[in-house]
Amino acid sequence: MNIDTKWLQDFLTLAELQHFTRAAEARHITQPAFGRHIRSLEKAVGKTLIDRATTPISLTPAGRQFKNVAYNIISQMEEGLNLLNNIEKPLSNPIRIASPHSLSSPILLDLIEHNSIEQQRFSIDILRVDFAMQSLMDGNCDFFLGFEILSLLQPPFQNIKIGHGNFLLTSLADKQGKPLFNPHVSKTPIIGYSAESYSARLIEQYQPEITKLNTYQVFESSMCHLHKEMALRGKGIAWLPDSLIQGELAAGTLVAIEPLLYRLPYQIRLYRNPSPLRKEAEDFWKNINLQVQSDWQINYPWEVDS
């Protein structure tokens, strides 16, 4: 296979800008020459990489998979040239992980600390779940740390289950260590999730099984961390993942309301595209696989007596 590295750079620019004219301008070549480069690359790969029928243009499934390959080839070449020339570049070619806010801390930080190998570097994008999923699909990250996402549990994606837990209905504790709010006794303020968020979809999924709560919504956000802060300020009750509030539950500042009744199970998974990754990213994936096979998990459900 004879591939010019300039074609790879052209392809990555086109994938980012989604427009032949703007991509050609960014690469400082004429549009006809740019178009020939892309066609030559497709011929060498043996697959159509660009869907030219869409507006703006988009990547085909093969193109999305090849994007990771092209990125890794260019990254390894740049890193090798930097080493040859004794150039140190901070965070050169890091392991790229996308994650939602709800898993960014402490889960993501604990995952990196527990599984990273010396001198591995990381670049983290904290995104809304659907944006993080799209980042993985488009080859803009190596891994997506997220909850159980049905579309990513299907081929060609791969995943490792690294933890599980429950969303709990929580309240600020009163002076006796009991929930400050009781939605069964009086109308209670509740902090709600934006309709497009994973948490809202999870709550809606279990809604038929949840005993009717006497609540009224006072705040809405897609971010679990904001819900936690609002609950700690006594603004209302909130559904929160136990992984986010282990410390508050242990200290008694937040209290789970009837946790045997109000609990919504979730899984934590690390997803990847099947395209070959750079050695550092592959090593990170293999190390996590080994840890999980040894019965390690990043999170276990909080229990009432814990």
Image (cartoon, helix red, strand yellow):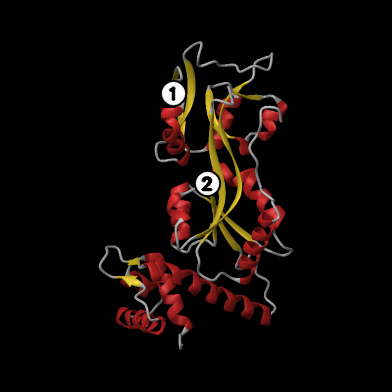
The residue under the point 66% across, 52% down is: 111
Q: Position of residue 19 (x, y in %)?
A: 32, 68
Question: What secondary structure is found at the residue carrying circle 1?
Answer: strand
Tag 1 residue: 217
Amino acid identity at mark 1: Gln
Q: Quadrant of residue 196?
A: top left
Residue 147's label in the rendered image is 2
Q: Position of residue 247 (x, y in %)?
A: 69, 33
Relative to 85, is 263 above or below? above
* Distance Cα–Cα, label 2 vs label 1: 25 Å
The answer to whether residue 200 is visible is yes
How dense is the environment of label 2, judged by Cα within 10 Å: few (below 14), some, or many (20 and up)?
many
Residue 169's label in the rendered image is none
Question: What secondary structure is found at the residue carrying circle 2?
Answer: loop
Q: Quadrant of residue 208?
A: top left
Relative to 223, is 298 above or below? below
The answer to whether residue 85 is visible is no
Judged from this view, the residue extending furthest toward the bottom is: 2
Q: With 88 as the anchor, is 103 left or right in this view?
A: left
Question: How many numbered marks, from 0 up?
Answer: 2
Q: Nearer the viewer, mark 2 or mark 1?
A: 2
Q: Nearer the viewer, residue 83 or 239?
A: 239
Q: Nearer the viewer, residue 295 or 111?
A: 295
Amino acid identity at mark 2: Phe
Judged from this view, the residue extending furthest toward the right is: 118
The residue under the point 45% across, 81% down is: 6
Q: Position of residue 139 (x, y in %)?
A: 47, 64
Relative to 90, is 264 above or below? above
The residue under the point 40% across, 84% down is: 44
